[in-house]
Amino acid sequence: MLHRCTRAIRALLVVLATGWALTPASGQAPSPGTAATTLPRTADGRPDLQGTWSNATITPIDRPEGAPPVYTEAQARRLERGYADRVERLAQPSDPNRTAPPQGGDGSTGAAGNVGGYNNFWVDPGDRVAVVNGQYRTSLIVDPPNGRVPALTDAGRRKAAARAEQFRTRGGEYDHPEFRPLAERCLMSFGSNAGPPMLPNYFYNNNYQIVQTKDHVMILAEMVHDVRIIRMNATAHPPAHIRPWMGDSIGRWEGDTLVVETTNFHPLQVFRGASDTLKVIERFTRVDADTIVYRFTIDDLDTWVAPWGGEVPFRRTDEQVFEYACHEGNYALANILSGARAQEREAATKKQNR
């Protein structure tokens, strides 16, 4: 599926970069007594969250086995240099006269049938270790302390098995468009980019634009141009049968932190197999001119044995958020389905000729 990625200029800068300077204080909480006078504020006195932000990072969501909770600055710099070296090594010019890869793929990734996809120029997953409160984090998840998603409940395991069985028995996954993933159909962001929770997709387009009024907060996600509308100071969510994309979000201020509660998620927007009782609590705290610390908590005891959550630094960027032109000029879905029909006709012809 070919998307027209709009991050080419930024990706080129990443390719040309040889290293980055990390400021340990990036994402650090403001000093007591100074935040009230130094934070940008709106006309009604609230912290101003407006602007364009990026949550791109090389820090994974789950902590790697055996990793400590935080890196030293030297370790973080070494990881970033390694990433920069890898990007530079992979950013080799493509040969327009190269031959087609062999049938079944070239074997470069070990995946059967791999014939390539985006080259490295278009990929922009981030280039820095996530820094929160001056700590170089090894995972975005901080609760539980091991930095990993808790185990599934018995009900969660049964539900996951039932979904897998349903997918296996419901018919061919290429029978009609509704069987294809939401992102492939350009309906929703890849992974959990738009949220909630708003997590990096580790591919590209990790930018967000926030517009803030007294009554509403709007968050535009660059990936697949999803828009969240947060209703400020509402008193109740809609009835359980009303389930919009990205759920229903209600916001309130707790001091200088915007707190958002989201429920009523759409049944097709399944975050890591969550149940229809999923509740996500988000906290947006602007800690300096260039940083919002974003904290999230996942509450779904029908699926996981305990609530869990994490922290993600959102860094201010001066870049614009362009339209993610997904279906415009994109013929991949029609070609995928017509290809499946062609395979079916071929199989039927072979069967008749036996």
Image (tube, rainbow, N blue to C red):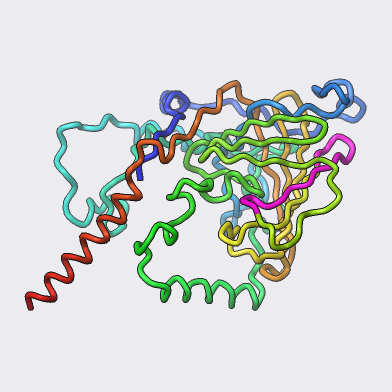
Which residue is drawn at the image coordinates 75% and 37% (left, top)? 133
Q: What secondary structure characterizes most of the magenta part?
A: strand
Judge whether residue 155 is colored magenta: no
The x and y percentages for residue 194 are 60, 44
Give the magenta range.
244-258
188 or 315, which lies in front? 188
**Residue at 64% of width from left, 50% of height from top?**
246
Q: Position of residue 322 (x, y in %)?
A: 51, 28
Give the residue displayed 76% in from the left and 55% down from the top.
Answer: 238
Determine if the magenta segment contains residue 252: yes
- The structure residue drawn at horizontal position 63% and vertical position 27%, both measured from the top left corner, is 52
Which quarter shows the C terminus? bottom left
* Residue 144 visible, this angle: no
Front residue (pair 114, 4): 4
Q: Is residue 152 above or below residue 221?
A: below
Q: Is residue 177 above or below residue 171?
A: above
Residue 121 showing in the rendered view:
yes
| Side of 202 where 232 appears, left or right | right
Quarter residue 298 falls in: bottom right
Q: Nearer the viewer, residue 89 or 304?
A: 304
Q: Residue furthest left?
A: 353
Q: Position of residue 92 (x, y in %)?
A: 30, 31
Indicate the position of residue 198 as horizontal and vertical percent values.
Answer: 64, 45
Q: Nearer the viewer, residue 95 or 324?
A: 324
Tell me the quarter of the picture where residue 50 sits.
top right
- How many marks the image carries: the answer is 0
